[in-house]
Amino acid sequence: MKKWFDELFRKKYTFGEETVRVETDPKVRYGFYFSLISLISLCTVEVIHLVVLGRWNSEVWSAIQILLGVVVGVYFGTSGTGVKRE
């Protein structure tokens, strides 16, 4: 799974003879990892809340939506930063 995340944040593009490597800042990557772990944890809390109490928790659902927006925003917002020419 680590290899998949590395490919997500490090890409190479070739334009003729020139190769351009695009990398995301490590701080952004760690923030993305934290958000992803938090999202998985909140989804687990929501499922446990549904199974044990039999009710939907709107506060947890709101937090899930916010974190999902952050994760998608980080992925698309940082796709062009950190260009390094080889």
Image (cartoon, helix red, strand yellow):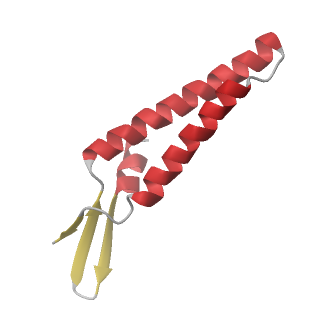
Residue 10 appears in which quarter of the rendering?
A: bottom left
Between 18 and 50, the one lying in front of the other is 50
Between 75 and 59, the one lying in front of the other is 59
| Residue at image coords 45%, 54% | 75
| Residue at image coords 42%, 49% | 4
Q: Is residue 84 left or right of residue 46?
A: left
Quarter of the figure that contains the C terminus: bottom left
In the picture as drawn, the residue positioned furthest to the top comes out as 52
Q: Is residue 18 left or right of residue 13?
A: left
Where is residue 3 drawn, in percent x and y? 37, 47
Residue 34 sits above or below residue 82 on the image: above
Residue 17 appears in which quarter of the rendering?
A: bottom left
Where is residue 85 drawn, in percent x and y? 18, 72
Q: Tag count in the figure?
A: 0
Quarter of the figure that contains the N terminus: top left
Between 25 and 6, the one lying in front of the other is 25
